[in-house]
Amino acid sequence: MTRRQFTFRCEGAQLVGTLDEAAGTTGLLLVTGGNEIRAGAWNGQALFADHIAQAGHPVLRFDRRGTGDSEGINGGFRSSVPDLAAALAAFRAQCPHLTRVVGFGNCDAASALMLAGGAGCDGLILSNPWTIEDDSEEAPAEVVRDHYRRRLTDPAAIKRLLTGKVPIGSLIRSLLSALRPAPKAPEGLAAEIAAGLASFSGEVRFLIAGRDRTGLAFLSKWDKTDPRICTFAEATHSYVEPAAQDWLVEQVLEVLRN
Protein backbone atom coordinates (compact mmCIF):
# COMPACT_ATOMS: atom_id res chain seq x y z
CA MET A 1 0.00 0.00 0.00
CA THR A 2 1.30 3.45 -0.98
CA ARG A 3 0.30 6.74 0.65
CA ARG A 4 0.99 9.99 -1.17
CA GLN A 5 0.03 13.65 -1.08
CA PHE A 6 -1.14 15.70 -4.06
CA THR A 7 -2.90 18.98 -4.80
CA PHE A 8 -5.95 19.90 -6.85
CA ARG A 9 -7.96 23.02 -7.58
CA CYS A 10 -11.33 24.19 -6.27
CA GLU A 11 -12.69 27.52 -7.54
CA GLY A 12 -9.21 28.99 -7.79
CA ALA A 13 -7.92 27.65 -4.47
CA GLN A 14 -5.33 24.89 -4.11
CA LEU A 15 -6.53 21.98 -2.00
CA VAL A 16 -4.36 19.25 -0.54
CA GLY A 17 -5.33 15.60 -0.48
CA THR A 18 -3.85 12.35 0.81
CA LEU A 19 -4.39 9.20 -1.19
CA ASP A 20 -3.98 5.69 0.20
CA GLU A 21 -3.65 3.62 -2.95
CA ALA A 22 -5.06 0.13 -3.43
CA ALA A 23 -6.03 -2.08 -6.35
CA GLY A 24 -9.77 -2.22 -5.68
CA THR A 25 -12.22 -0.61 -8.08
CA THR A 26 -14.42 0.80 -5.29
CA GLY A 27 -12.89 3.71 -3.43
CA LEU A 28 -13.77 5.67 -0.29
CA LEU A 29 -13.97 9.47 -0.31
CA LEU A 30 -13.40 10.37 3.32
CA VAL A 31 -14.91 13.78 4.15
CA THR A 32 -13.86 15.52 7.36
CA GLY A 33 -16.33 17.16 9.72
CA GLY A 34 -16.18 20.58 11.35
CA ASN A 35 -12.80 22.26 10.95
CA GLU A 36 -10.94 18.98 11.33
CA ILE A 37 -7.94 18.40 9.09
CA ARG A 38 -7.68 15.36 6.87
CA ALA A 39 -5.53 13.40 9.35
CA GLY A 40 -8.35 13.58 11.90
CA ALA A 41 -8.12 14.00 15.65
CA TRP A 42 -5.02 12.25 16.97
CA ASN A 43 -4.40 10.94 13.45
CA GLY A 44 -7.62 8.91 13.66
CA GLN A 45 -8.72 9.37 10.04
CA ALA A 46 -5.25 8.50 8.75
CA LEU A 47 -5.33 5.25 10.70
CA PHE A 48 -8.87 4.54 9.53
CA ALA A 49 -7.87 5.15 5.91
CA ASP A 50 -4.98 2.72 6.32
CA HIS A 51 -7.36 -0.01 7.54
CA ILE A 52 -9.60 0.46 4.51
CA ALA A 53 -6.73 0.59 2.04
CA GLN A 54 -5.16 -2.52 3.55
CA ALA A 55 -8.47 -4.25 2.79
CA GLY A 56 -8.02 -3.32 -0.88
CA HIS A 57 -9.92 -0.05 -1.34
CA PRO A 58 -8.31 3.29 -2.29
CA VAL A 59 -9.07 6.13 0.13
CA LEU A 60 -8.89 9.88 -0.47
CA ARG A 61 -8.83 12.35 2.41
CA PHE A 62 -8.59 16.09 1.80
CA ASP A 63 -8.63 19.48 3.50
CA ARG A 64 -11.52 21.58 2.21
CA ARG A 65 -10.99 25.25 1.53
CA GLY A 66 -9.67 27.23 4.46
CA THR A 67 -8.72 24.22 6.61
CA GLY A 68 -5.45 22.39 7.14
CA ASP A 69 -3.05 22.79 4.23
CA SER A 70 -5.65 24.03 1.74
CA GLU A 71 -6.04 27.58 0.50
CA GLY A 72 -9.24 29.62 0.38
CA ILE A 73 -11.92 30.75 2.78
CA ASN A 74 -13.50 28.38 5.26
CA GLY A 75 -17.23 28.72 4.69
CA GLY A 76 -18.27 25.71 6.76
CA PHE A 77 -20.05 22.57 5.72
CA ARG A 78 -22.91 24.40 4.00
CA SER A 79 -20.50 25.84 1.41
CA SER A 80 -18.57 22.64 0.74
CA VAL A 81 -20.42 21.40 -2.38
CA PRO A 82 -17.65 22.67 -4.73
CA ASP A 83 -14.99 21.10 -2.48
CA LEU A 84 -16.74 17.73 -2.61
CA ALA A 85 -17.09 17.89 -6.40
CA ALA A 86 -13.44 18.86 -6.85
CA ALA A 87 -12.25 16.10 -4.51
CA LEU A 88 -14.34 13.45 -6.28
CA ALA A 89 -12.99 14.54 -9.68
CA ALA A 90 -9.44 14.48 -8.33
CA PHE A 91 -9.97 11.03 -6.83
CA ARG A 92 -11.15 9.62 -10.15
CA ALA A 93 -8.27 11.30 -11.98
CA GLN A 94 -5.69 9.90 -9.55
CA CYS A 95 -7.27 6.42 -9.62
CA PRO A 96 -8.62 5.91 -13.16
CA HIS A 97 -9.35 2.25 -12.39
CA LEU A 98 -12.20 3.24 -10.03
CA THR A 99 -15.69 2.24 -11.13
CA ARG A 100 -17.46 3.21 -7.90
CA VAL A 101 -16.85 5.78 -5.14
CA VAL A 102 -18.54 5.75 -1.74
CA GLY A 103 -18.61 8.96 0.29
CA PHE A 104 -18.18 8.75 4.05
CA GLY A 105 -18.74 11.59 6.50
CA ASN A 106 -19.20 11.94 10.24
CA CYS A 107 -21.18 14.78 11.87
CA ASP A 108 -21.55 17.82 9.59
CA ALA A 109 -19.54 16.05 6.89
CA ALA A 110 -22.45 13.60 6.63
CA SER A 111 -24.85 16.55 6.42
CA ALA A 112 -22.70 18.15 3.72
CA LEU A 113 -22.92 15.00 1.60
CA MET A 114 -26.69 14.95 2.04
CA LEU A 115 -27.12 18.64 1.22
CA ALA A 116 -25.08 17.98 -1.94
CA GLY A 117 -27.43 15.19 -3.01
CA GLY A 118 -24.61 12.69 -2.67
CA ALA A 119 -22.02 14.96 -4.33
CA GLY A 120 -21.72 12.63 -7.32
CA CYS A 121 -20.80 9.57 -5.24
CA ASP A 122 -22.21 6.14 -6.00
CA GLY A 123 -22.93 5.31 -2.37
CA LEU A 124 -23.02 7.10 0.99
CA ILE A 125 -22.11 6.18 4.55
CA LEU A 126 -23.56 8.86 6.82
CA SER A 127 -22.43 8.81 10.42
CA ASN A 128 -24.14 10.84 13.16
CA PRO A 129 -25.47 13.52 10.75
CA TRP A 130 -25.49 17.02 12.19
CA THR A 131 -28.99 18.46 12.65
CA ILE A 132 -28.42 20.84 15.58
CA GLU A 133 -28.84 24.39 14.29
CA ASP A 134 -28.17 26.27 17.52
CA ASP A 135 -25.97 25.30 20.48
CA SER A 136 -28.72 26.62 22.76
CA GLU A 137 -31.24 24.26 21.18
CA GLU A 138 -33.01 22.18 23.79
CA ALA A 139 -31.73 18.62 23.97
CA PRO A 140 -34.02 16.17 22.12
CA ALA A 141 -36.11 13.83 24.24
CA GLU A 142 -34.00 10.86 23.09
CA VAL A 143 -30.86 12.51 24.45
CA VAL A 144 -32.49 13.27 27.80
CA ARG A 145 -33.90 9.76 28.12
CA ASP A 146 -30.51 8.23 27.30
CA HIS A 147 -28.85 10.46 29.90
CA TYR A 148 -31.20 9.39 32.68
CA ARG A 149 -31.14 5.75 31.67
CA ARG A 150 -27.38 5.77 32.16
CA ARG A 151 -27.57 7.82 35.35
CA LEU A 152 -29.99 5.33 36.90
CA THR A 153 -27.38 2.61 36.53
CA ASP A 154 -24.75 4.76 38.28
CA PRO A 155 -24.74 4.21 42.08
CA ALA A 156 -23.03 7.57 42.68
CA ALA A 157 -25.72 9.40 40.71
CA ILE A 158 -28.50 7.63 42.62
CA LYS A 159 -26.82 8.58 45.91
CA ARG A 160 -26.69 12.25 44.87
CA LEU A 161 -30.41 12.14 44.06
CA LEU A 162 -31.37 10.48 47.36
CA THR A 163 -29.25 12.89 49.41
CA GLY A 164 -30.81 15.96 47.82
CA LYS A 165 -27.74 17.03 45.84
CA VAL A 166 -29.66 17.16 42.55
CA PRO A 167 -31.65 20.41 41.99
CA ILE A 168 -35.30 19.33 41.89
CA GLY A 169 -36.33 22.12 39.49
CA SER A 170 -33.76 21.11 36.89
CA LEU A 171 -34.66 17.46 37.33
CA ILE A 172 -38.37 18.14 36.74
CA ARG A 173 -37.68 20.24 33.64
CA SER A 174 -35.45 17.49 32.23
CA LEU A 175 -38.02 14.79 32.92
CA LEU A 176 -40.75 16.84 31.24
CA SER A 177 -38.54 17.37 28.19
CA ALA A 178 -38.02 13.61 27.98
CA LEU A 179 -41.77 13.25 27.50
CA ARG A 180 -41.93 15.59 24.51
CA PRO A 181 -43.34 13.89 21.40
CA ALA A 182 -41.06 13.56 18.40
CA PRO A 183 -41.74 15.96 15.51
CA LYS A 184 -44.07 14.52 12.87
CA ALA A 185 -41.75 15.53 10.02
CA PRO A 186 -38.17 16.81 9.75
CA GLU A 187 -37.77 20.54 10.27
CA GLY A 188 -34.99 23.05 9.63
CA LEU A 189 -31.62 21.50 8.77
CA ALA A 190 -33.06 18.00 9.18
CA ALA A 191 -35.61 18.81 6.47
CA GLU A 192 -32.89 20.24 4.22
CA ILE A 193 -30.69 17.16 4.42
CA ALA A 194 -33.71 14.91 3.92
CA ALA A 195 -34.61 16.83 0.75
CA GLY A 196 -31.03 16.62 -0.50
CA LEU A 197 -30.86 12.89 0.11
CA ALA A 198 -34.21 12.32 -1.61
CA SER A 199 -32.56 12.96 -4.98
CA PHE A 200 -29.87 10.32 -4.37
CA SER A 201 -30.46 6.90 -5.90
CA GLY A 202 -27.38 5.05 -4.65
CA GLU A 203 -26.91 2.90 -1.57
CA VAL A 204 -27.17 4.74 1.76
CA ARG A 205 -26.22 3.55 5.22
CA PHE A 206 -26.64 5.60 8.40
CA LEU A 207 -24.27 4.81 11.26
CA ILE A 208 -25.28 6.04 14.70
CA ALA A 209 -23.16 6.04 17.86
CA GLY A 210 -25.56 5.21 20.68
CA ARG A 211 -23.76 7.41 23.23
CA ASP A 212 -23.48 10.46 21.00
CA ARG A 213 -25.71 13.52 21.42
CA THR A 214 -25.36 14.38 17.73
CA GLY A 215 -26.42 10.92 16.60
CA LEU A 216 -29.33 10.78 19.06
CA ALA A 217 -30.44 14.27 17.99
CA PHE A 218 -30.50 13.04 14.39
CA LEU A 219 -32.63 10.04 15.35
CA SER A 220 -35.09 12.34 17.12
CA LYS A 221 -35.70 14.15 13.81
CA TRP A 222 -35.64 11.16 11.46
CA ASP A 223 -37.85 8.16 10.75
CA LYS A 224 -36.57 5.61 13.26
CA THR A 225 -37.98 2.77 11.15
CA ASP A 226 -35.62 3.66 8.28
CA PRO A 227 -34.01 0.27 7.51
CA ARG A 228 -30.79 2.00 6.49
CA ILE A 229 -30.00 2.94 10.12
CA CYS A 230 -27.38 0.88 11.97
CA THR A 231 -26.53 1.68 15.60
CA PHE A 232 -23.69 0.68 17.91
CA ALA A 233 -25.09 1.26 21.38
CA GLU A 234 -21.83 1.83 23.28
CA ALA A 235 -20.05 4.01 20.72
CA THR A 236 -19.27 7.68 21.26
CA HIS A 237 -19.12 10.31 18.52
CA SER A 238 -15.77 9.35 16.94
CA TYR A 239 -15.95 5.60 17.65
CA VAL A 240 -12.82 5.70 19.82
CA GLU A 241 -13.74 2.54 21.71
CA PRO A 242 -11.90 -0.54 20.32
CA ALA A 243 -15.11 -2.49 19.73
CA ALA A 244 -16.72 0.54 18.11
CA GLN A 245 -13.70 1.03 15.83
CA ASP A 246 -13.94 -2.57 14.69
CA TRP A 247 -17.68 -2.15 14.06
CA LEU A 248 -17.12 1.03 12.06
CA VAL A 249 -14.51 -0.60 9.81
CA GLU A 250 -16.77 -3.63 9.33
CA GLN A 251 -19.74 -1.44 8.35
CA VAL A 252 -17.72 0.60 5.87
CA LEU A 253 -16.13 -2.44 4.25
CA GLU A 254 -19.54 -4.09 3.91
CA VAL A 255 -20.81 -1.12 1.88
CA LEU A 256 -17.62 -0.96 -0.18
CA ARG A 257 -17.91 -4.66 -1.05
CA ASN A 258 -21.58 -4.49 -2.09
Image: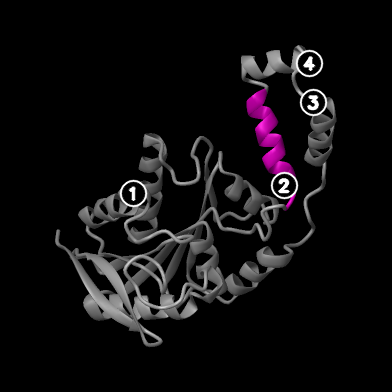
At label 1, the amino acid type is Gly
At label 2, the amino acid type is Pro
Alpha-carbon span between mark 4 and mark 3: 7 Å
**Residue under circle 4?**
164
Looking at the picture, tell me which residue is in the foreground, 199 or 83.
83
Circles 4 and 2, Cβ within 8 Å, touching? The answer is: no
**Residue under circle 1?**
44
Quadrant hosting residue 19? bottom left
- Check the picture and name the quadrant holding the C terminus: bottom left
Q: Position of residue 227 (x, y in %)?
A: 58, 54
Does label 4 or label 2 sit earlier along the sequence? 2
Does label 4 or label 1 sit earlier along the sequence? 1
- The residue lying at 34 percent from left, 54 percent from top is 45
Local secondary structure at mark 3? loop
Say above or below: 103 vs 163: below
Say above or below: 142 vs 136: above
Which mark lies nearer to you, 1 or 3? 3
Alpha-carbon span between mark 3 and mark 2: 20 Å
The answer to whether residue 97 shows anywhere in this view is no
Local secondary structure at mark 1? helix
Near mark 3 (Cα within 10 A), the count class, few <14, some 14-19 or many ≥20, is few
Looking at the picture, tell me which residue is in the foreground, 164 or 185.
164
Magenta segment includes 148? yes
The residue segment tinted magenta is 137-151
Say above or below: 142 vs 253: above
**Residue under circle 2?**
140
